[in-house]
Structures are given as structure tokens and as C-alpha cells.
Image (spheres, grey):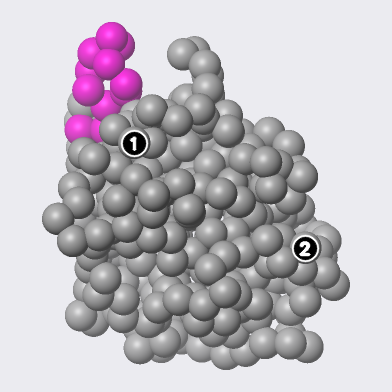
């Protein structure tokens, strides 16, 4: 493999560019939260994603009970129960290699199932691949999106929008870019359908008219929520763009520890 396959070979361009992400929202069964957390970060985080070629970075966030208290709407097709979905894992995938990575990830997780390397006491709330659709930064020379997960932001705000009939991604981009950015950076994604041979415990979400926005925060997400994010859903609807089907703050996990496992509910 020539090195030029990985980068552009032109230092005036981004040598490493984000193409998309794996986004997975999971709920451990009560009484198994410590065991789940340790299994995920000590095994599955690596064996299910990070060891794969073309993985740029990964990180995890957690929604403690005070984070869940801020979630809205109360129920939706995306999240019928807002108490579920305690752990959010994000993985960045290199541009130009997304298709290869999706196939590798599907094959790898199927292999983990076949070799008894999965954890039964948990439920997927949402697991899907997304392609990058835009990004915004608080400062012109801020943290590159490719480094957002390695930056270890202490907080994150996740918004899933469902577009009204006839609304385009360009309209969403224009609206988003017209608003003050209440974060260090925000990355926007659109969904990619799951492969037919994906593991059966991964829910099939066929809603394609959605836009995911991830706001990376430099402070506590709960403290920032009411002033910066609580009204975002109403503003999106008032603009005639659609509705929010999931909005939640998350805190960064503390790898290698059981921090927050006693604060999920």
C-alpha cells in the first residue's frame, strides 16, 4: 500500500480526513453496569472497532441520571424510553475507506458473536453508521474535527433531528450555520443503512430522513443545557425543518475506572 492512499500527499490539504462515524447507544441491564463497562472498554471497544484498519479514533460518553433528566422529547420513535441509552460510543472512520470499514466491522462483530466475546446483559438503543455532512467551529483555528475524540471533551450534546417532508440537508446546514455555536465544535452527520448481515441484536433503523448533530463541549453538559440546548428543538421546529426525536447531554467516561456506573439511574 502506498502512503498516498492514506493521505492526499498535499500538505495544503487535510492529510487525514474524517469520512464518517459509528454511533452506538447502549443500555446495560441493571445490576450488570460495572461488568458491562469493564467488558466494553477492556474488550469490545478495541476488538469491535479500534483494531480495524481505517479507524481514526474512538471515545465513550455516559448519560448519568441528571443528564437523562434533561432529555427530550419524552418519547419518540428513536427513543421510546428516555431512561435507556446510558452509554454512547463514537468511532471516527477515515474518508475514502468507509465502505471497507463497514464490511470489516460487520464481519468482525459477527466473529465476536461466534467466539463468545459479546456481553448478553445489555440492549442496543441505537447503532448505525453515519457519513459526515458538515462541521462548525467556535474559532477558525480550533481543534480539527479529526482530533475531536482524542481531545477528550468533558461534555457532549447529542441531537437527532427528523426532517419534515421536502426539507433538504442544505436547508439544515444553512439554519445551523446562522445560529451562534454553543460549543467548541459541532459535527453533522446523515445515516447510512445497516448491512443485511449485521448481528441480529443491532436494531434495524430504516429512518433515512434524519440528521445527527454532535456538539463537543468544554464544560459540564448539564450546566450548559438549559441556556444553550433546551430550546433547540423548538427552534428547529419553528424554522419548519422538522422535529427533534432525541436530545441528550453526556459526560465523558473515565477510562479504566467504574466512575459514573453508580449514577446511571
What residue lies at 32% left-to-right and 57% top-to-bottom?
A: 242
- Where residue 220 appears, as percent x and y from the top left, is 75, 43
Residue bearing the label numbered 1 = 175
Question: How far is disc 1 from disc 2 in space, using C-alphas?
Answer: 29 Å
Q: Residue at x 48, y 54 (%)?
A: 233
Q: Is residue 116 left or right of residue 168?
A: right
Position in image of residue 3 (x %, y %): 25, 28
Q: Is residue 147 visible?
A: no
Residue 212 part of the magenta-drawn span = no
For label 1, the crowd category at 10 Å Cα-Cα, with few meaning under 14, some 14 to 19 and many 20 or more, is some
- Mark 1 or 2, which is nearer the eye? 1
Residue 143 in view (yes/no): yes
Q: Position of residue 174 (x, y in %)?
A: 29, 33
Up/down of 238 relative to 147, above or below: below
Taking depth in this image into account, of 254 and 192 the one nearest to the observer is: 192
How far from the left and from the top, in percent, is residue 166?
14, 55
Give the extent of the magenta segment: 5-15
Task: Pick whichever of labels 1 and 2 is earlier in the sequence.
Answer: 2
Q: Residue at x 52, y 77 (%)?
A: 75
Q: Quadrant of residue 258?
A: bottom right
Amino acid at each position: 500500500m502506498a502512503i498516498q492512499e492514506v493521505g492526499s500527499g498535499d500538505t495544503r490539504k487535510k492529510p487525514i480526513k474524517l469520512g464518517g462515524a459509528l454511533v452506538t447507544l447502549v443500555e446495560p441491564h441493571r445490576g450488570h453496569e460495572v461488568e458491562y463497562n469493564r467488558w466494553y472498554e477492556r474488550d469490545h471497544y478495541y476488538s469491535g472497532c479500534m483494531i480495524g484498519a481505517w479507524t481514526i479514533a474512538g471515545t465513550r460518553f455516559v448519560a448519568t441520571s441528571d443528564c437523562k433528566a434533561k432529555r427530550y422529547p419524552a418519547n419518540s420513535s428513536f427513543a421510546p424510553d428516555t431512561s435507556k441509552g446510558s452509554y454512547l460510543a463514537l468511532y471516527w472512520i477515515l474518508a475514502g475507506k468507509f465502505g471497507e470499514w463497514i464490511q470489516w466491522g460487520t464481519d468482525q462483530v459477527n466473529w465476536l458473536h461466534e467466539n463468545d466475546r459479546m456481553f448478553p446483559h445489555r440492549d442496543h438503543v441505537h447503532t448505525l453508521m453515519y457519513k459526515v455532512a458538515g462541521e462548525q467551529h467556535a474559532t477558525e483555528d480550533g481543534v480539527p474535527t479529526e482530533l475531536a475524540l482524542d481531545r477528550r471533551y468533558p461534555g457532549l450534546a447529542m441531537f437527532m433531528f427528523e426532517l419534515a417532508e421536502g426539507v433538504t440537508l442544505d436547508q439544515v446546514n444553512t439554519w445551523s450555520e446562522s445560529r451562534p455555536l454553543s460549543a467548541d465544535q459541532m459535527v453533522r452527520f446523515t445515516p447510512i443503512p445497516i448491512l443485511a448481515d449485521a448481528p441480529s441484536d443491532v436494531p434495524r433503523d430504516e429512518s433515512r430522513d434524519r440528521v445527527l448533530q454532535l456538539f463537543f463541549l468544554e464544560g459540564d453538559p448539564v450546566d450548559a443545557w438549559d441556556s444553550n440546548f433546551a430550546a433547540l428543538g423548538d427552534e428547529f421546529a419553528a424554522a419548519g425543518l422538522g422535529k427533534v426525536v432525541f436530545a441528550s447531554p453526556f459526560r465523558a467516561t473515565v477510562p479504566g475506572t467504574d466512575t459514573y456506573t453508580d449514577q446511571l439511574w
